[in-house]
């Protein structure tokens, strides 16, 4: 659903969570005189500590450096361009706009760069095996960032993080889940390091869910400290936080189950979905998503249309999709019945009209019904349509200012099409789209 920076970043907001009242160094404030900061000199010593905390041996020393804000920004741009073509970025933006998650004029790539430039406090680059520290980070926080980045270096030495950066296209739900284990783990080790340095006992296995604790902190709304993050659309803000907040709760649950060796095993069998990350019990029970092979709508749409994007929203994606327009608790409950999904976005080359077709599968009939009703409510708010043109227990049709919309519920599946130019076309598309095929993973 959203575009990711390289696997190994530390976010400033994490430091903020740790420090409580971190004095944020403004852009243009004094940067370090040279790249050989005291903190960087402590890298080898911190690596020893992190290696003990994480129970992973050091296979080789870790290369390090510092980067100015401009250099970090250049790395972010390079990394984004490396993993997404401008056309792919644009296609994602069109889908998110059609979903009503971004304003119509929103510049996704530019905002993503600004957001990451504000938030990235350091990162580990699996390609070069270097970690970089943002040179403007307050000295007191530098070692904490280094502990986080060295965790990524050890992950890479043992479990190969390069594969995370070359993720196959078309399943960003699984990609987000994979990032969540790496970031959740690095966040926990960073906490352990920080508390250890302060002499405070810290045992995550004795704490309630770290996800709930981190979500409750809510530092993302501090406009003075984080102007870009605090003003970001929810899909970007929560998308950026997901691997850290939900990943920490996920890794914590694995630690409770079987310590670091259980976490090690999870690198061989990665979490397959955000659902598994959000509900570690489903990961441990090996509850895999239902895969959906979408029926092609190109022929039904006509030759002016082309498919520009296809992806999986996942439970987390549906929590965002619903929660943008309806009560958040209700959205969370409705999304929790997720069994699998797949969507495709089509664009009309002449008019630039956009159509999104979603095939969704739910764990039970009751879950499908709950989602059907929640998405109906979302649709009415999203398009400001007071009532459906047609409505019965299993089908809703809406005429909106952005085309015709249909929701159809059959058994444990719900199909949604948004953006047809006529009711007649909507029916033909839906008939074709129900030919999509499901298979257990
Ligand atoms: Zn990280």
Image (cartoon, rainbow, N blue to C red):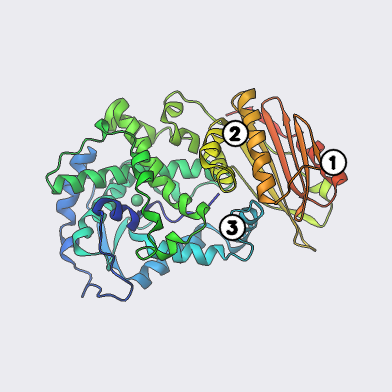
Task: Name above or below for residue 187 compared with residue 286.
Answer: below
Q: Which residue is mark 2?
A: 340
Read off the residue under disc 1.
428
Quadrant where the C terminus sits is top right
Q: Under tag 2, what secondary structure?
A: strand
Residues at circles 1 and 2 in contact by the CB criterion of under 8 Å: no
Query: Which residue is drawn at the image coordinates 83% and 47% (left, top)?
Result: 299
- The Cα–Cα distance between marks 1 and 2, rounded to whole angstroms, is 24 Å
Depth-wise, is mark 2 or mark 3 nearer the camera? Answer: 3
Residue 374 higher or lower than 418, as above or below: above
Q: How far, Cα to Cα, is label 2 from label 3?
A: 24 Å
Ranked by sequence position, the earlier of labels 1 and 2 is 2
Taking the image as shown, residue 157 lies to the left or right of residue 400, namely left
Pick whichever, 132 or 24, lies toward us: 24
Q: Is residue 160 visible?
A: no
Residue position marked by numbered label 3 in the rendering: 102
Question: Could you tell me how far apart the alpha carbons at marks 1 and 3 are, in whole angstroms?
Answer: 29 Å
Q: Position of residue 352 (x, y in %)?
A: 75, 62
Query: Where in the figure is residue 215, as x and y percent of width and height?
Result: 38, 44
Q: Is residue 389 left or right of residue 62?
A: right
Q: Secondary structure at mark 1?
A: helix
Q: Earlier in the sequence, mark 1 or mark 3?
A: 3
- Give the mark nearer the N terminus: 2 vs 3: 3
Give percent across and percent down for residue 249.
Answer: 36, 37
Q: Name the spot of residue 411 as percent of width and height, x first.
A: 70, 24
């Amino acid at each position: 659903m959203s575009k990711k920076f390289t696997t190994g970043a530390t976010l400033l907001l994490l430091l903020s969570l740790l420090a409580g009242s971190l004095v944020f160094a403004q852009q243009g404030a004094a940067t370090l005189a040279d790249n050989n900061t005291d903190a960087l000199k402590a890298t080898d010593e911190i690596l020893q500590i992190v290696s003990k905390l994480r129970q992973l041996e050091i296979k080789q020393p870790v290369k390090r450096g510092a980067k100015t804000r401009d250099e970090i920004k250049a790395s972010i741009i390079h990394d984004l361009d490396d993993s997404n073509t401008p056309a792919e970025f644009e296609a994602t933006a069109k889908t998110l706009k059609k979903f009503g998650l971004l304003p119509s004029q929103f510049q996704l790539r530019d905002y993503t760069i600004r957001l990451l430039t504000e938030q990235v406090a350091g990162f580990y680059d699996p390609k070069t095996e270097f970690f970089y520290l943002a040179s403007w980070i307050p000295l007191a926080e530098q070692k904490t960032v280094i502990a986080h980045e060295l965790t990524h270096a050890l992950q890479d030495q043992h479990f190969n993080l390069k594969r995370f950066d070359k993720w196959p296209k078309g399943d960003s739900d699984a990609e987000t889940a994979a990032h969540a284990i790496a970031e959740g783990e690095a966040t926990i080790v960073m906490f352990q390091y920080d508390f250890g340095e302060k002499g405070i006992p810290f045992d995550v296995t004795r704490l309630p869910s770290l996800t709930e604790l981190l979500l409750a902190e809510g530092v993302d709304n501090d406009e003075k400290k984080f102007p870009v993050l605090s003003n970001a659309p929810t899909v970007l803000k929560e998308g950026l936080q997901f691997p850290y907040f939900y990943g920490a709760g996920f890794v914590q649950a694995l630690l409770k189950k079987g310590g670091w060796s259980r976490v090690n095993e999870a690198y061989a069998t990665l979490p397959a979905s955000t659902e598994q990350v959000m509900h570690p019990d489903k990961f441990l029970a090996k509850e895999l998503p239902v895969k959906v092979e979408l029926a092609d709508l190109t022929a039904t749409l006509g030759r002016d249309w082309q498919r520009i994007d296809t992806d999986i929203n996942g439970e987390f994606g549906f929590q965002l999709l619903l929660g943008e327009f309806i009560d958040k608790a209700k959205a969370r409950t409705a999304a929790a019945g997720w069994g699998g999904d797949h969507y495709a976005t089509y664009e009309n080359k002449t008019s630039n009209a956009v159509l999104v077709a979603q095939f969704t599968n739910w764990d039970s009939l009751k879950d499908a019904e709950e989602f059907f009703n929640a998405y109906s409510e979302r649709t009415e708010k999203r398009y400001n349509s007071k009532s459906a043109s047609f409505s019965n227990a299993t089908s809703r049709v809406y005429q909106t200012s952005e085309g015709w919309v249909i929701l159809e519920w059959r058994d444990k599946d719900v199909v949604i099409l948004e953006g047809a130019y006529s009711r007649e076309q909507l029916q033909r598309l839906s008939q074709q789209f129900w030919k999509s095929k499901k298979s257990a993973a």
